Image (spheres, rainbow, N blue to C red):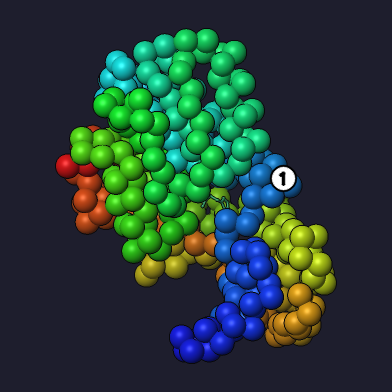
Amino acid sequence: MRSAQTLARLRGDLAGVEDQFSLSVIEGLSKTRKTLPCRYFYDARGSELFEEITRLPEYYPTRTEMGILAEHAAEITDGIGDGGLLVEFGSGSSLKTEILLDRIAERIAYVPIDVSEAALADAKARLARRYPGLDVRTIVADFSGFVALPDDLASRRKTGFFPGSTLGNLAPKDARHLLAGFGRVLGDGGRLIIGIDLKKDPRTLVRAYNDAAGVTAAFNLNLLLRINRELGSTFDERAFRHEAIYDPREGRIEMHLVSKRDQEVELCGRSFNFRNGESIHTENSYKYTIEQFRELAGAAGWQPERVWTDAASQFSVHELVWV
Ligand code: AVJ
């Protein structure tokens, strides 16, 4: 563990490095146990590889969640209500949302929130064609901060939508804070529909993050290529291998990039050393039981209501109310 002082000194050294990406990469690689933040997986190539992951036979979450949403769409959209507001946190392409919009588009307003202006523009154009009666109000923002909803819609009944088990990337404490933040955005009486991956046989979990075709490996290794391209570093991606392990104590899948040999990498005028077998921890994906997630939601200030799951109990979709 590094002391707060060491980190503060490191930040001081980084005074000249202004952008957030290089800052977090340098900070992560300077730790005794090296890390890289998983939010940087999603450049153009990474987003393409993630799309490919969602279609893999081993990666059950996406298709299972979509099956649950489709099967229970009537109950879920009942909760949104006529004249309601559907607020999606990190909406991306808004593809899963269509399962709900198919039933209620002309009776609600839809507020997709995403950091990518381009993704929002694409989604808005597609939705306008598909649902001419839908009122779409895009907001370019990072959903981890407070987002003010449009003033003229303030009195509407509000439902947040956060599918994909994206919450699983956060440690429980951070997950609790994010959930509480959603509550503050949606306000009293607000609802949240959230997709959460469930605990299961570790072999099934590990296979989902270490597929036979090697797509997840390419997705993980692409992070090094992105860092080379955007920060001018000298990573040789062939000198690292993808690893996915399940930690039953933490209840999480961990993805790592493991160095295949002793090596040195140059980045922003610094050099970083990797021992043979040393890992860079690139992602956590926490898994919950239904009860564990309801407890976490409760600790964040949400009242758990209905929960829907698939026949094999692989994935869950929860309805929460902010009281
Ligand atoms: C989109 C964050 C939910 O953790 O399952 C897929 C990302 N990483 N395969 C997940 C991911 C490796 C995914 N989330």
Q: Which residue is drawn at the image coordinates 28% and 20% (left, top)? A: 81
Q: Is residue 161 left or right of residue 183?
A: right
Q: Which residue is drawn at the image coordinates 28% and 25% (left, top)? A: 156
Residue 166 seen by the camera: yes
Q: Amino acid at mark 1?
A: Ala
Up/down of 262 relative to 286, above or below: below
Q: Nearer the viewer, residue 182 or 223?
A: 182
Q: Quadrant of residue 315?
A: top left
Assign the C terminus to one quadrant of the image: top left
Q: Quadrant of residue 305?
A: top left
Up/down of 104 relative to 85, above or below: above
Task: From the image, tell me which residue sits under label 1.
Answer: 44
Residue 61 seen by the camera: no
Q: Which residue is drawn at the image coordinates 44% and 52% (left, top)? A: 144
Give the percent coordinates (x, y) of residue 275. 70, 85
Q: Nearer the viewer, residue 55 or 90?
A: 90
Give the percent coordinates (x, y) of residue 258. 67, 73
Q: Which residue is drawn at the image coordinates 57% and 64% (left, top)? A: 37
Give the percent coordinates (x, y) of residue 194. 36, 40
Classify mark 1 as within 8 Å of ligand 1 or not, answering yes or no.
no
Give the percent coordinates (x, y) of residue 297. 26, 50
